[in-house]
């Protein structure tokens, strides 16, 4: 659907430019936008490579195990049926750590691994288990202590204080996570009641 919307916007821009006689300005904008996109891509690639490497070092050094123990008590409340020594629990922990550091795309590989492990534990059924629902909600809400990717984007666009948004990010991500988790937990309880009742 988004592809259709973007295509309509581009075609509409070209038609308006032809009608208004501003084709030179349109072609200049296309060229500038392409250059900006490549510059942004290179900036983000460097940050993602750095943090992906650091996450790999953390995995091999045993920091993952330490973080799993640190996050075990609160995560046990959200994932009570999940073994804290399982690969799924470790992947969930690393995904949450990457999200807390605001690493965005760097959290994706661990999120995919966690979902694969949860799907395996779920027996490959077509319906998501409670743990999958909670994990997707937490991953989507993405509680961030240090919005690294957002700071990098702001810095790339010339912000002199790219991390001055810390407090609003903390408030908005905590509120989003609280509301989303509340809805997901209530939904899980209702669906269990419906299935059991």
Image (cartoon, helix red, strand yellow):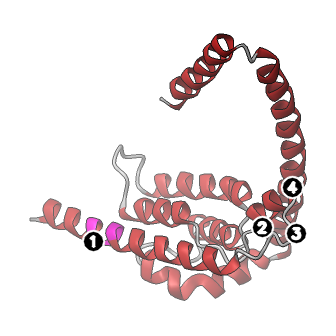
In the rendered image, residue 191 lying in the magenta stretch gets the answer no
Count neighbours of disc 1 (C-alpha within 10 A) and say few if under 14, some if 14 to 19, many if 20 or more: few
* Percent coordinates x, y for residue 126 in the rendering: 35, 43
Q: Nearer the viewer, residue 139 or 80?
A: 139
Report the residue marked by disc 4: 156
Residue range of the region highlighted in magenta in the rendering: 183-187
* Pointers 4 and 3 in contact (C-beta within 8 Å): no
For numbered disc 2, what is the local secondary structure? helix
Earlier residue among tags 1 and 2: 2
Q: Is residue 158 above or below residue 169?
A: above
Circle 4 SS class: helix
Which residue in the protein does label 2 denote?
Answer: 148
Name which quarter of the figure residue 70 lies in: bottom right
* Quarter of the view holding residue 196: bottom left
CA separation in Å, label 4 and label 2 = 12 Å
- Tell me the residue that label 1 is attached to: 186
- In the rendered image, residue 5, in percent from the top left (x then y), is placed at 52, 28
Q: Main secondary structure of the magenta part?
A: helix
In the displayed structure, would residue 174 be above or below residue 20? Answer: below
- Residue that appears at 64% across and 85% down: 69
Which tag, 3 or 2, sits closer to the chain's start? 2
Looking at the image, residue 35 lies above or below residue 45: above
* Label 3 packing within 10 angstroms: few (<14), some (14-19), many (20+): few
Q: Nearer the viewer, mark 1 or mark 4?
A: 4
CB-based contact (under 8 Å), mark 4 and mark 2: no
Q: Quick one: SS at disc 1?
A: helix
Q: Which residue is mark 3?
A: 160
Calculate the distance from the C-alpha at mark 3 to the C-alpha at mark 1: 43 Å
| Residue at the extreme front of the image, as rendered | 20
């Amino acid at each position: 659907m988004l592809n259709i919307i973007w295509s309509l916007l581009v075609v509409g821009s070209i038609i308006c430019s032809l009608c208004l006689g501003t084709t030179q300005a349109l072609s200049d904008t296309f060229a500038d936008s392409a250059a900006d996109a490549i510059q942004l891509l290179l900036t983000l690639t460097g940050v993602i490579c750095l943090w992906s490497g650091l996450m790999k070092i953390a995995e091999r050094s045993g920091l993952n195990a330490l973080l799993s123990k640190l996050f075990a008590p609160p995560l046990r409340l959200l994932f009570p049926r999940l073994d804290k020594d399982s690969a799924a629990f470790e992947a969930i922990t690393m995904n949450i750590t990457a999200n807390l550091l605001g690493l965005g795309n760097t959290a994706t590989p661990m999120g995919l691994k966690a979902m694969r492990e949860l799907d395996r534990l779920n027996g490959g059924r077509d319906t998501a288990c409670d743990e999958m629902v909670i994990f997707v909600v937490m991953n989507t809400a993405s509680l961030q202590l240090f919005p690294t990717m957002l700071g990098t984007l702001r810095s790339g666009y010339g912000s002199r204080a790219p991390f001055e948004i810390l407090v609003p990010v903390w408030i908005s991500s905590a509120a989003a996570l609280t509301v989303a988790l509340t809805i997901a937990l209530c939904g899980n309880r209702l669906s269990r009641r419906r299935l059991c009742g």
